[in-house]
Amino acid sequence: MKKTLNIGLVGYGTVGKGVVKILEKNKAIALAKSGVKINVKSICDLNPIDKPQLYVKNFNDVIADPEIDIVVELIGGYEPARTVITESLKHGKNVVTANKAVLAKYWDEIFSLAQENKKMVYFEASVGGVIPVIQGLNEGLAGNEIKSIKGILNGTTNFILSKMTDEATDYSTALKDAQQAGFAEANPTADVKGYDTANKLAILSSLAWGSWIKVSDIRVKGIDRLDVEDVKITRDFGYVFKLIGSAIKTDKGIDLWVEPCLIDHHNFFATVHNEYNAVKITGDASDDVVFYGKGAGQLPAASAVVSDIIDLSKFVSNGTAGLVQNVGYSKKKVVKFLPHGKSKSDYYLRFSVVDRPGVLSKISGILGQHGVSIASLYQDDRNKNKKVSIIVTTHRAYSENIDEALKEIDKLSTVKSKTVKVRIEN
């Protein structure tokens, strides 16, 4: 049994520095929990680092080092991160990564290589920052058939939506605030268009149902076109906007989507503010289990990476790592998906129309023809352009029926802009 376990760190940015900081500060805790001394032997980065004695310029030198037991990939992006992970596995190294994009896109390749080489890949920090949702799903709920996964999985968008709700600021202003606060990148596309949430939902779903669920299997809509007018209106009705990632197992397949939703203010998700994340997993035996914590920030993310290193070290030190895989995955397992149009929900609809008799009856008639039942209706006062907003909430309806109705309604001469449609998540 090894007494010292060597780590090779590839990527020494914000999270990488946090990992080294925690390992140095809490080395006694790590030793007590892993039973082995954890030593950072080398650090690879594009630029020289503040620990020159550990600096390695080429990541291949880290991978090829026979003394390195675990390679920790913290580069981000697709390449060379994918190469670092796959080549490490081929060279007999166990891997820890925080890279949700690579995992979601190359799940099959990575976990097939892990099985072939009898090595392990840990990735707690890839979803939810500090939240131990990967371990909770993979181990704590291992005896359950998973029924559903729902979550606020992106701290950037949740910060923006919190700003829009609390301060009634428009999207552009809230995004700038998020960037100034360090919660949004200079290029926030992956976050605000929902791709980051989709990557994380794909990872959780692949874990839950033992197959490779791709981002392309998920219907994705971001928050970048959200109008603060709808935030103000729905806030008065007792709703808040949240970007939700959802995977629900139905008799006809898994219903997968990411989109901004209206959440009743009594719902737990409505209380999740700023950079915090929350995930609710429902199992057949466990019922609802909720995970909550910071989804962004140096130390929260580094904390999850270090927890992976400690847990993996237990197996590496006694030579059992990879004998049994930590991720159940089979190429042969086929998962059915619910067609997107068959997803059912209540909806919020805002029609911008001219103030003329008969407009409302025409809209309600078209909705009825498509099997959409109105739950409530509200009309704003006339504005200076002689347009009014008609607000409708519906009873549960198929999304394809809603979409077909809106196509017809938006062609009416009395409708002055494209109808706003938002899922109401009960």
Image (tube, rainbow, N blue to C red):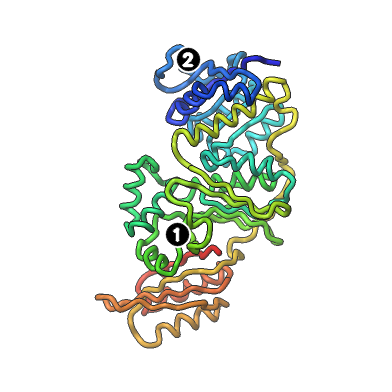
Which mark is first along the chain, 2 or 1? Answer: 2
Q: Quadrant of the N terminus?
A: top right
The circle drawn on residue 367 is none
In the rendered image, residue 172, in percent from the top left (x then y), is placed at: 32, 53
- For mark 2, give the secondary structure: helix
Q: Is 354 in front, or is 275? A: 275
> Would you place residue 296 above or below residue 6 in this image?
below
Q: What amino acid is found at the position of numbered circle 1 in the picture?
A: Phe
Q: Say which residue label 1 marks.
A: 241
Cα gap from disc 1 to disc 2, whole angstroms:
46 Å
Q: Residue at x 54, y 53 (%)?
A: 245
Classify residue 204 by image quadrant. Answer: top right
- For mark 1, give the secondary structure: strand
Q: What amino acid is found at the position of numbered circle 2 in the picture?
A: Leu
Q: Residues within 10 Å of mark 2 (few under 14, many from 20)?
A: some
Q: Is 397 in front, or is 215? A: 397
Q: Say which residue label 2 marks.
A: 54
In the rendered image, residue 155, in percent from the top left (x then y), is placed at: 45, 46
Q: Residue at x 67, y 57 (%)?
A: 249
Q: Residues within 10 Å of mark 1 (few under 14, many from 20)?
A: many
